[in-house]
Image: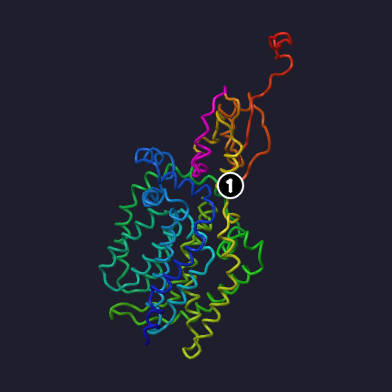
Amino acid sequence: MTLTARIARSPGAPAALAFAFVMWGIGVPSFWRDESVSVLAARMSFGELRELLAHIDTVHALYYLLLRPFASGGEAAARLPSALAVAGATAGIAAIGRRLSAPGSWTGTYAGLVYALLPMVSRYGQEARSYALVSAVAVAATLVLLGERRSRYVGYGLLVALLGWFHLYALLLLPAHALVVLRRRGELLPWLVSLAGAAVLLAPLVYLASGQRDEQLFWLKTPDLTALAQFGVEISGGPVSWRDSATPPLFLALLGLLALLGIWYGSRPTVPASPGALPVSLAAVAVPWALVPVALSFAISQVYPVYNPRYVMFVLPALALLAGAALASVPPRRVPVGVAVLAVLAVLSASAQVTVRGPANRPDDLRTLAADLGAAERPGDAVLYMPERFWLFVSVYGGPYEKLVPFTPEAERVWLVSRRVLAAEWSSDPRLAALKRGFVRAGPTRRSGAVRVTLYTRRLPSNHERPPAAARARPS
């Protein structure tokens, strides 16, 4: 094998390409409201962060601590951990593909490149949230699980704990891992012991976060089949990409076809390194990984909503592995055919890749909203956040918001910064009641996604409340 071929087959090659790809335009889109929370939380003092986590977002505590060194450097810096996570996940996918395929196969390389081409991977690889890191840890845990030494279960248990600390719902990966473990002789007991250790490490998080679920995820609804189909839309670029181009559906169709072919071609078990272990095929690992977490999330959500496409993004590596197995199934003498199919997949993803790097593909454009506010505000203007903690969701571009003073009924001009729809319990807030009683809306509402900013000015007294004309006359 030539040096070039060795480099191309190494996990580092697709990882480097994935990192370069996800760094393209990483600072272009504005932060949106969830990223605003991440960045502002990461900039807080430890005392302020502890106070925040006592009320909300305990489940993201580890990510906020990880983000601290990057949070003050702008969009690209804050999103850098996610970009690095994409590269790490790509390397892990390539390594899993090599381990579960015949010697000399290109399965790992193809799988890593397919993962890098997924528009959803680019979208969340360019976001200051934990979802790309969750996928990377899921890949790492799966790679360690596929080893042969019993001692690996120490590292596996630590990775499972890390997975839960980044996102508790990602633990839905464990039933898929169980199906792999049950295929391997003598692995069940050490696997269960490792999970028990992980449970001990996760217990504080579960305890602290258990009381925050209603405030944290009140917006989740019971999904129907349409919501489940939305996952496919997100994988191929999101609703904006589907609206603007005809290629995302074609990309999704080709990806689905490759995944189905990968189930067929990836069903042959590999010979394990240890003679005491049972062989396991790529399909036996990837199919449960791709399907079980999504199915469980959807089923649980019929009673207790937990489903959202980004919460199950960690199944995409399995989809890439199946597609990689299909692409690598082309006989070696006809490798350019696999390259050609990969090139078609890249072309079909191009429009979505451009779209996900634009502000229109984010739920909010907080940068533009802050600029509009800065241009319209006046010295002495007040601000009312509704609900009160909503400042976390908007003020990542702090300049205009820092110039506003807290709301009092004596203010002359007030900016109401709120959600698009205010819940019933917030409508009874005495501050909002004082605003509606003493002020009137002045001018159009500035909207961006679910955020709205509205100017209110002091209500003029009615005619019978006005003083007599003689009293209002200015002295000569």
**Residue 448 horizontal/vertical position (percent):** 61, 46
Does dot 1 land on a helix, a strand or a loop?
Answer: helix
Q: Is residue 113 above or below residue 397?
A: below
Q: Is residue 211 above or below residue 322?
A: above
The stretch of residues the image draws in magenta is 391-410
The picture quadrant where one finds residue 471 is top right
* Residue type marked 1: Thr
Q: Is residue 200 above or below residue 456?
A: below
Instruction: From the viewer's side, name the closer residue of 231 and 336.
Output: 336
Instruction: From the viewer's side, name the closer residue of 222 and 406.
Output: 406
Kindly give the residue lying farthest to the front in the view shown: 476
**Residue 431 horizontal/vertical position (percent):** 56, 28
Instruction: From the viewer's side, name the closer residue of 318 and 433.
Output: 433
> Which residue occupies 29% across, 74% down?
148
Instruction: From the viewer's side, name the closer residue of 447 and 253.
Output: 447
Q: Is residue 401 magenta?
A: yes
**Residue 38 horizontal/vertical position (percent):** 45, 48
Disc 1 designates what residue? 368
* Residue 26 falls left or right of residue 207: right
Label 1: few (<14), some or many (≥20) within 10 Å?
some
